[in-house]
Amino acid sequence: MNAMDRALVRRTIRIALMSVVLVSAIPAMAFKIVEPAENSVLKSGKAVTVKVDLGQNPGVIKVRYYWYPELGDTLVEQDEDEKSAGPTQNKIAIDKFLTKDSATGGSIVVTPLLVATAEADPPFGGKLPVPPEAIGVVRLLAVGDISRGRLGTRSVFDEILVRVEPEAELTSIEFETDKPLRLGRAGQVATYGQVDTLGKIIELPVVGQFSDGVVRPIGSPTTGTSYRSSNEKVIKVHPQFGLLQLVGNGRTTLTVTNRGKKEDLEVIVEVGDEPNESPIADAGPNRTVKAGAKVELNGLKSRDPEGEALFYAWSQVRGSKVPLLDVNMPRASFVAPQVSEKRLFRFKLRVSDKKGADSLPAFVDVVVEP
């Protein structure tokens, strides 16, 4: 290699290095939560510093912060200073932290626990209280409002999963139900809407009494709770969801364990003996779409072993809230919102047959690209 060739190689290397420096110096395109970090362990009831990187999103005027259980419905959002809401709409996010599925009910409005502007410290962040009742895996959702002048506002968001642990010790496990728990009436004929039928899937109302005086819901397996049924011919346990399925008449003892504590609940199942298997929900394949596209969620592959008609319930469990249409139909739909970077939206489908048997939840992920 002659001197000219060596000089050309050195120049090429310098240009390449300068390109790397320039690329690394470009700020992130995305709106992103930078504090706390994904999978952080936080303490129930304690304030945590939250901070966002706006990325290349000029015009952000405020950022709203929300807490949700890991698989809890993403609720309709509302600013804390909006006064037009009805009496049931003014509850803060802590009150809504225990809200169960809203797919079959009306819209629920949630107020952010923190609304931060550029004047905050840090800008668009600050001290965010963790709900005292929170335990296990929860979602932190940050929504940035961008002013577009006379065109109004648009939103960007980021969402992370963190784990919340109470500093207090678990002192006892309790069931918010009658003891023993009696499900159904002997000889009753199953009809749609009946509370207890064979094939019905239920969520046991389990709470933990902690030494700080706070009662926390510990039904989810992410809180450390495990279930065991002494007779799985009566009640079958689905440990991945913490759900229980009625499969036969008789007696069983449900044992719930968490943090070294254990509690038993006797359950007597006396439903109509008409055989009925639970239907199977199918929320369709995951997909990636462009912002602005109409997205159809297709549950038509859901099925019932006996071939009966199905009733559908769609809900959203990840991402900033989108207007979801036809939530009680086989096909639900929404318009993919504008995003500055790929964003995940997750939806849940539950189906029931006409006798009242339920499916386990099925999930579908929709990634929206700019």
Image: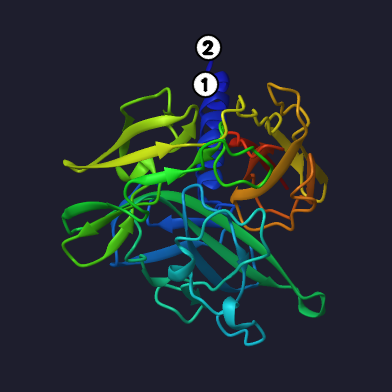
Q: Eyeballing the image, is 199 above or below 142?
A: above
Q: Is residue 207 left or right of residue 361?
A: left
Label 1 – label 2 distance at C-alpha: 7 Å
What amino acid type is highlighted by mark number 1? Arg
Q: Eyeballing the image, is 73 above or below 83?
A: above
Q: Is residue 311 left or right of residue 28?
A: right
Q: How many marks?
A: 2
Q: Which residue is mark 1?
A: 6
The local secondary structure at tag 2 comes to loop
**Which residue does the image show at 36% across and 66% down from the upper left?**
131
What amino acid type is highlighted by mark number 2? Met
Q: Earlier in the sequence, mark 1 or mark 2?
A: 2
State the image coordinates of residue 57 (x, y, percent, origin top left).
64, 63
Q: Is residue 1 left or right of residue 135?
A: right
Q: Which residue is mark 2?
A: 1
State the image coordinates of residue 137 (x, y, percent, origin top left).
39, 48
- The colouring scheme, among rainbow, by chain, secondary structure or one colour, is rainbow
Tell me the quarter of the picture where residue 290 sits: top right
Other-residue count near label 2 (Cα within 10 Å), few / some / many at <14 / 14–19 / ≥20 = few
Label ID, residue 58: none
Between 151 and 202, the residue placed more toward the observer is: 202
Between 56 and 141, the residue placed more toward the observer is: 141
Q: Residue furthest front?
A: 187
State the image coordinates of residue 79 (x, y, percent, origin top left).
59, 77
For the residues labelled 1 and 2, say whether their Cβ atoms are less than 8 Å apart. Answer: yes
Other-residue count near label 1 (Cα within 10 Å), few / some / many at <14 / 14–19 / ≥20 = few
Q: Is residue 267 left or right of residue 59?
A: left
In this orientation, does residue 17 appear?
Answer: yes
